[in-house]
Image (cartoon, rainbow, N blue to C red):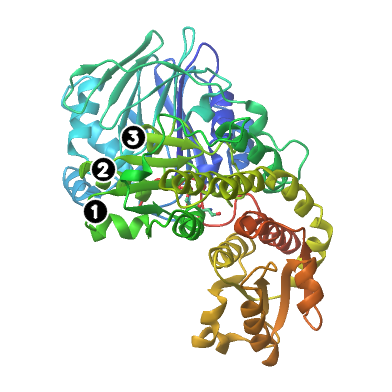
């Protein structure tokens, strides 16, 4: 969380910094700020709330200079306020930071004792004051930054800018991602390549522990011991149009609508014309795998939960699914023959990355399923399987989820093929079914007007329950997560058979219960659970197909009919009504759909 950017340019940088911050706003939007050096003089502007407030401020109170740094904040230490907004500065140095300085209290006490005057409640301000102490001791900026970094514990991506230094930025990475962009007589630094995309496609990613001394002539890289290191310049192609709303009111609406097309891209990438699954990089030898450990957070975790049903059922492989923040500190044993799989849209989620490193330390082969191919998780994996969803900007993950499911379904089918647990005709049928999903998703999108009408009713509720059975259970959790995340309505998902073990006490005629139930082999069981809800006055929204609606649609509060879908892949299709319901409920409530309160897209702190 928090986006940082830096520019050593050949013309005024304030507008360039603001444009780059726009592309990083998905990382946080509690406040934003920039600092520049102009004719040697360091100055800054900061504003609370969205970036637009900073843009407005700069109209009335511009900031000149061709060298600058910028920040968009997701608050960790200290409420959103001007004082807590980055850049933080001491006299001759300004810093922007993504991460958490864990020993900041001890450092702050030490600095206060030496006479430093703190303005903010943040951990970051200690970094600026510490650097100032070393500058006051007569150290040059580079040494002062180095000595400062030696004192810091925790995770950070940091950028330093110094008074009197028009041609210098110092960047450092420990735990949080950072990229250096190479221009012609200009240099850039950003939290990711998307921020720098219109400025340059020539990117160097800092490795863990790296520092970069950046001037307009280029960047020198050093490892955490201060030894010079070579870091590759890669050419990264990012389609800037994928970062635009393209006529939609919200990114979320655009990303929901894109699902048939991006899933088609992903399936074509992994399935040859003759219908064989082709995993990159030599694939995975499933004959040597005896169990899978899948680790992720949030929606990606729910994709893993869904994949567990597929992999266990199709390939006969036991699967453990873990929340990354729990996995990393539980220190679980990893038995021989375990394949560790990490799923992340951003590829930067701090807990998932830490869990990956835990497994890598145990000499595990690391497989990841990621959307951002240049992300830390992708780069630290032995095999990264891209989901090819394109840039996902809305905080609520939609196309990321369904593309994760598509790739994980292919992994399950490939495991089954290698292990001989599916005969060839059945395997070929499943692959064909998967290939048919983009068309089916289009048909599901066509139900949007009806979903929107139901969502208007849902927006009156204060509590909503989602029920699902089998592989629809993780989707019930996902439906609830999506709804609460953007509409702020309290929502819970339950396995439908579990309801009578407690949660049914919540049911009354004010609580909509959304039952996700394609007409599959578990349909009758789910319908029985639905009847139990209706018998207690619960108002049921049944999301099913034409057969399900004909059999059980009578007497329910609302019925939403989805197109037919092969049973195995129903979770992919039923994700769409869950997303559309959440989206239109949020729109009806007037919330900030793409940037819901308290959240950020990329969770790079633990
Ligand atoms: O980038 P990741 O897939 O690792 O992110 C994991 C979660 O933070 C993310 O899925 C989050 O739960 C979404 N906002 C849900 O819509």
- Quadrant of the snapshot with the N terminus: top left
At numbered mark 2, what does the secondary structure look like: helix, strand or loop? loop
Residue 156 figure quarter? top left
Above or below, 89 relative to 233? below
The one nearer the camera, 256 or 564, is: 564
Mark linked to residue 334: 1
Between disc 3 and disc 2, the foreground one is 2
Q: Residue at x 58, y 38 (%)?
A: 54
Check contact, mark 1 vs mark 2: CB within 8 A. yes
Alpha-carbon neighbours of circle 1 within 10 Å: few (<14), some, or many (≥20)? some
Mark closest to the chain's N terminus, 3 or 2: 2
Beta carbon at label 1 within 8 Å of ligand 1: no
x and y percent of residue 238 in the render?
Answer: 57, 25
Looking at the rendered structure, the secondary structure element under dot 3 is loop
Q: Which residue is mark 2?
A: 364
**Residue 6 at x, y percent in the picture:** 44, 25
* Residue 66 higher or lower than 442, as above or below: above
State the residue in front, 9 or 533: 533
> In whole angstroms, how far apart are the C-alphas of marks 3 and 2?
12 Å
Q: Position of residue 89 (x, y in %)?
A: 36, 35
Q: Secondary structure at mark 1?
A: loop
Vertical order, 459 against 412 (above or below): below
Residue behind mark 3: 380
- Residue closer to the observer: 520 or 408: 520
Q: Earlier in the sequence, mark 1 or mark 2?
A: 1
**Callout 3: CB less than 8 Å from ligand 1:** no
Residue 456 appears in the picture as rendered: no
């Amino acid at each position: 969380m928090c986006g940082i950017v830096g520019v050593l340019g050949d013309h005024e940088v304030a507008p360039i910094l603001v444009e780059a911050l726009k592309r990083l706003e998905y990382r946080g939007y509690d406040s934003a700020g920039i600092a520049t050096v102009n004719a040697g003089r360091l100055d800054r502007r900061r504003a609370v709330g969205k970036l637009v407030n900073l843009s407005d401020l700069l109209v009335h109170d511009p900031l000149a200079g061709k060298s600058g740094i910028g920040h968009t904040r997701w608050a960790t230490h200290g409420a959103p306020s001007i004082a807590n907004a980055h850049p933080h500065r001491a006299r001759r140095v300004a810093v922007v930071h993504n991460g958490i300085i864990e020993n900041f209290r001890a450092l702050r006490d030490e600095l206060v004792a030496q006479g430093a005057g703190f303005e903010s409640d943040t951990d970051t301000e200690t970094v600026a004051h510490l650097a100032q102490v070393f500058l006051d001791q007569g150290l040059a900026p580079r040494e002062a930054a180095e000595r400062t970094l030696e004192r810091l514990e925790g995770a950070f991506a940091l950028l330093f800018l110094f008074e009197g230094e028009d041609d210098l930025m110092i960047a450092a990475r420990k735990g949080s991602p950072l990229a250096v962009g190479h221009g012609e007589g200009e240099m850039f630094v950003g939290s990711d390549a998307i921020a720098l995309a219109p400025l340059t496609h020539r990117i160097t990613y800092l490795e863990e522990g790296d520092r970069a001394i950046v001037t307009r002539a280029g960047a020198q890289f050093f490892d955490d011991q201060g030894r010079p290191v070579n870091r590759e310049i890669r050419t990264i192609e990012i389609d800037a149009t994928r970062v635009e709303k393209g006529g939609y009111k919200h990114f979320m609406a655009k990303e929901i609508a894109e699902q048939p097309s991006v899933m088609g891209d992903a399936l074509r990438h992994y399935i040859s014309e003759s219908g064989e699954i082709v995993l990159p990089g030599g694939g995975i030898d499933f004959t040597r795998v005896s169990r899978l450990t899948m680790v992720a957070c949030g929606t990606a975790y729910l994709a893993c939960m869904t994949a567990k049903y597929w992999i266990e059922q199709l390939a006969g492989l036991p699967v453990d699914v873990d929340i990354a923040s729990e996995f990393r500190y539980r220190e679980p044993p990893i038995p021989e023959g375990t394949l560790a799989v990490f799923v992340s849209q951003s590829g930067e989620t701090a807990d998932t990355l830490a869990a990956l490193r835990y497994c890598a330390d145990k000499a595990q082969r690391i497989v990841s399923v990621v959307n951002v191919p240049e992300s830390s998780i992708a780069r630290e994996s032995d095999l990264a399987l891209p989901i090819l969803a394109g840039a996902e900007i809305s905080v609520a993950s939609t196309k990321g989820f369904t593309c994760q499911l598509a790739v994980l379904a292919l992994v399950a089918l490939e495991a089954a093929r290698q292990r001989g647990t599916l005969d060839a005709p059945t395997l070929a049928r499943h692959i064909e079914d998967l290939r048919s999903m983009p068309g089916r998703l289009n048909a599901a999108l066509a139900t949007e007007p009806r979903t929107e009408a139901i969502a208007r009713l849902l927006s009156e509720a204060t509590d909503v329950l989602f029920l699902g059975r089998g592989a629809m259970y993780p989707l019930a959790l996902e439906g609830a997560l999506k709804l609460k995340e953007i509409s702020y309505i309290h929502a819970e998902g339950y396995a439908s058979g579990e309801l009578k073990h407690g949660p049914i006490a919540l049911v009354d005629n004010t609580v909509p219960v959304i039952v996700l139930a394609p007409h599959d082999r578990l349909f009758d069981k789910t319908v029985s659970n639905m009847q139990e809800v209706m018998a207690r006055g619960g108002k049921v929204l049944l999301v099913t197909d034409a057969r399900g609606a004909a059999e059980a649609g009578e007497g329910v509060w609302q019925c939403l009919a989805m197109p037919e879908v092969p049973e195995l892949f129903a979770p992919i299709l039923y994700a769409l009504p869950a997303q559309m319901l959440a989206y239109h409920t949020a729109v009806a409530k007037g919330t900030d759909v793409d940037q819901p309160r308290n959240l950020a897209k990329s969770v790079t702190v633990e």
